[in-house]
Structure formats: C-alpha cells, structure tokens
Image (cartoon, rainbow, N blue to C red):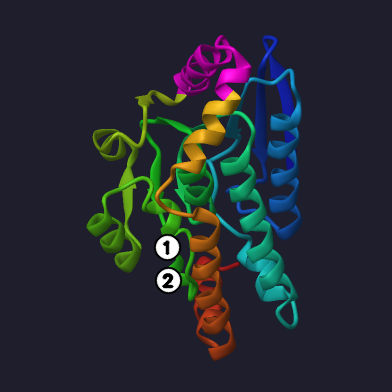
C-alpha cells in the first residue's frame, strides 16, 4: 500500500493511491489516505487536490481479507473509522478535490468520489455500492450525491453498477474521456480552479459545504451503525466469507 503526494505546476497537489491488486484499502491505508488529502489541503501553496489511483481501478472499498482474518471487531471498527476519516478528509479538504476515476469505483470508492467536488472519469469507469452482498451497509450517503433518489435505492438494493457515461447525464460526472486521457482531463479542471484566487476558492469551498442539504458526516455515521448491528447478528461474517470463498481468496 502506498499513498503519494506530488506537486504539479505550482498549486496542484496530486494524491495517488496504489494498493494492488484492486485498491481495496486496509485500515491503515484509509487513515494514510485521509492524512494525505488533509495535509495537501492544509498547505497554503496548494489551490486544488487531484485524487487518483494506479492499477485496475480507482478503489474497491475495504480489504475484506483483513477483516475476516481479525478476531473480534477491532478490524471492523478500524475500517469504519478509517473510511469515515478518508471520506471526511475529501469533503472537508480546505480546497476543492477533483477525483479522477477509472475502472471500478466500488463501496469506499463511491464514498471518496461522492464527497469530491469534481468527478472526471474514464470511459471504462463503473460506480456501485455492493455492500448488501457483503453483509454491510454504507456509502448510500455518497451514492445519493451521484444519482437521483430512486436510482440510488435501486442500485443499492440490487448491488448493480452505473457507468460514468450515465453519471455524466445526471451532471455528477463532469467529463468522460478515454483512459489514456484521464490524468490530463483531471489536471485541466484542476488548473482552471488553481488559477483562481485561492482565498476566494477556499471561502467558496467552505460556503458550499455549509449550504449542503445533507450532513454527510452524520448521515454516513448513521449507516455505519447498521453495519455493526449486522456484524453482531453474524450476517456480515457469513457474507464476507462467501465472497472470499467465491473468489478463492
């Protein structure tokens, strides 16, 4: 697992996640990502952050193997808190965050993209929340920021995915490009934002968060409570193990 931060031009920070094979993050990985995004936004020389990933997809959520290998609920609680921290870091980042999404964007990936200020995606990107098939709940808060209410419920209950092109029609994805052009497309948007007076943009970010109709922090925390209940009932453990057995992991 690695999270690196690179400065592009003078005022764009690019945070890259690289956790092979599918960017499913461990507890430590979620907190590392949170620290990187928060740190980039706290730098007065940074005017905008681009969040991207290497490998087969943007993000596949939590590392289920880590949770299944742990005794008790320590890893589960850690994953809950780590996801909460990373999603909050994106939402509360002092400067706008541009998410550059390719391949799969699942579960925690939707949490990150849904809390970003701008989403640019490659034409192979798919978004979904397969939590119900893993015996968990979560990220409906963030999926609801990407699709209309009834579609959110349909996608949530069925664990189906939606393409970047479909999201662009809803206006939640700003641009869809070929995979090879994704980084450039994200940087184009980032540079446009970075060219503005950062004092105004930082104030605008805080103002826009302040007028949001949904308190994303409270809403997501509410969802997490049901995940813990499902774990206490044993439903989550059974679903996670069935998923790992199916994958031969």
Q: Percent from the top left, x then y, of residue 155?
A: 30, 59
Q: Which residue carries the number 1 mark?
A: 130
Main secondary structure of the magenta stretch: helix
Residue 68 point in image, percent of width and height: 66, 75
- Position in image of residue 14 (x %, y %): 65, 26
- Quarter holding the C terminus is bottom right
Whether residue 197 appears in magenta in the rendering, the answer is: yes
Q: Where is 47 relative to 126, above or below?
A: above
Tell me, yes or no, whether the two marked residues, 1 and 2, touch with CB atoms within 8 Å: yes
Residue 21 visible in the snapshot: no
Q: Which residues are magenta?
A: 180-201
Q: Is residue 230 above or below residue 125?
A: below
Residue toward you, 247 or 147: 147
| Residue pointed to by mark 2 | 133
Q: How many marks?
A: 2
Residue at 43% x, 45% y: name it: 212
Q: Who is closer to the viewer here, 207 or 143?
A: 207
């Amino acid at each position: 697992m690695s999270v690196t931060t690179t400065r592009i031009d003078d005022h764009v920070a690019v945070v890259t996640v690289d956790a092979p094979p599918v960017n499913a993050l461990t507890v430590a990985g979620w907190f590392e990502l949170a620290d990187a995004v928060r740190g980039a936004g706290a730098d007065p020389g940074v005017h905008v952050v681009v969040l991207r990933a290497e490998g087969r997809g943007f993000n596949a959520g939590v590392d289920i193997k880590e949770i299944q290998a742990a005794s008790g609920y320590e890893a589960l609680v850690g994953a809950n808190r780590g996801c909460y921290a990373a999603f909050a870091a994106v939402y509360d980042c002092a400067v706008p965050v541009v998410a550059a999404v390719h391949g799969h964007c699942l579960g925690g990936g939707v949490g990150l993209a849904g809390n970003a200020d701008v989403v640019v995606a490659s034409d192979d990107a798919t978004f979904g929340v397969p939590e119900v098939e893993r015996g968990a709940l979560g990220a409906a808060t963030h999926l609801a920021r990407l699709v209309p209410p009834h579609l959110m419920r349909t996608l949530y209950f069925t664990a189906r995915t939606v393409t970047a092109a479909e999201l662009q029609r809803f206006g939640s994805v700003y641009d869809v490009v070929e995979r090879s052009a994704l980084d450039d497309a994200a940087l184009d948007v980032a540079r446009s934002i970075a060219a503005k007076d950062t004092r105004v943009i930082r104030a605008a970010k805080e103002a826009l968060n302040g007028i949001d109709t949904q308190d994303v922090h409270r809403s997501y925390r509410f969802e997490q409570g049901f995940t813990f209940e499902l774990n206490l009932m044993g439903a989550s453990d059974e679903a996670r193990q069935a998923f790992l057995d199916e994958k031969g992991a």
